[in-house]
Image: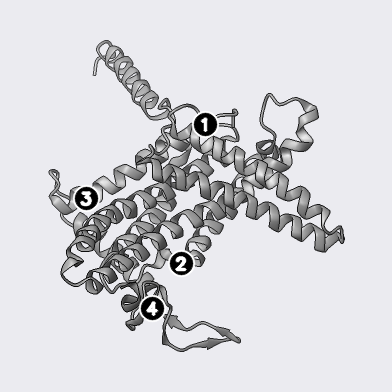
Amino acid sequence: MTGEREPPDLRNLGDRLRQARGRIEGTPTDPERPPNQMGLALRVVTEMAAALFVGGMLGYGIDSWLGTRPWGLLALLVLGAAAGMRGAFREARRASGGDDGGGG
Amino acid sequence: MAEEAHGAAHGPLDQFEIHRIWELEMFGIDASFTNSALWMLIVVAAITLFLTMSMSGRAMVPGRWQSLAEAAYGLIAGAVRDNVGSEGRAYFPFVFTLFMFVLFANFLGLIPFSFTVTSHIIVTFAMAAFIFVGVTVLGLVRHRFRFFTLFSPPGVPVYLAPLLVPIEIIGYLTRPISLSVRLAANMLAGHTMLEVFAGFVVAMGIFGIAPFVAVIAIYALEVIVAFLQAYVFAVLTCLYLSDAIHLHPH
């Protein structure tokens, strides 16, 4: 009513709002905790196998598109294995509670 | 002993068989209504029933059912907030829908004689592919060409880029496959294991008490796995969303 009494309240409210926003936005990323070692092992294995599979399929596709059999398949299988390792490593790092490794 | 279990009409893999309930041919495509489709409908009906019934009271102090619904909501809201941040709130309905569908499909699949929708890789892959395409389109719309910086990790020397960029791209393309395979493989393995042990119970006669105990233990484990895999599915969706929105967040 009188403009005198409101500002401290409003400032207070603003502070509280900022605090609440900070709670919402400033939370660290907290990916899934590993339930057990077997779950982690399964995750790592699917990651590696899937990357190898994708690499192989891409290589096969490139080969049948450009007619470069077998070089595309060979090269992309190696790249797929590397991607699988990277993914598995990232998964393991994430599970062990550190950052996800490799800076993204 | 295993022979007898297999010799019976019911093998451990029969539970995953697809039956046509209502034959339907549409534009030369077999679009029959199968037991898989039936169970998907049951899952959706169960979710609708659960959420509307439990929240119908809207009590200030929640009852048991309402707290369950609120816990599910809070779990996913928390996952979205922690992994995507406040921009992720727009995608909460999407993640929550996915989570509830996977969760209920997993749980209903644990009822004896039911059918586990999520044990079929085509079902999980359809969801994962949808997430993958959606997230990629979202990233492209939000960041245009800057989206492709997702494939070049920061702080990498230029001469390594020709090697690392293809690796990152393969890693990106791996996502829908590892996401779908993980869920389907977990369901498939657990249910097969349950049936194999259940077969031993009958085959071993009086000594069947040992596999019977094992079946109970595995069943308890499967309940946890059913929940956990649904949660992992939701959290990974959040992480992919976060990648598309922030490009290099975590």
Which chain contains the residue that carries disc 2? B
Residue linked to disc 4: B35
Q: Is B205 left, or right, of A84 in this rendering?
A: left
As drawn, the label of residue B68 is 3
Q: Nearer the viewer, mark 3 or mark 2?
A: 2
Residue A17 seen in render: yes
Amino acid type shown at disc 3? Leu
Q: Residue at x 28, y 71 (%)?
A: B199
Image coordinates for residue B59, horizontal then vertical, percent: 14, 48
Residues beneath discs 3 and 4 located on the same chain: yes
- Few, some or many residues within 10 Å of mark 4 (<14, 14–19, 20+): many
Labelled disc at residue B120: 2
Q: Could you tell me which chain the residue with mark 3 belongs to?
A: B
Q: Inspect the image, locate mark 2, and give the three-letter code of the amino acid beneath it.
A: His
Q: CA distance from mark 3 to mark 2?
A: 28 Å
How busy is the neighbourhood of tag 3: few (under 14 within 10 Å), some, or many (20 plus)?
some
* Mark 1 nearby-residue class (10 Å; few <14, some 14–19, many ≥20): some
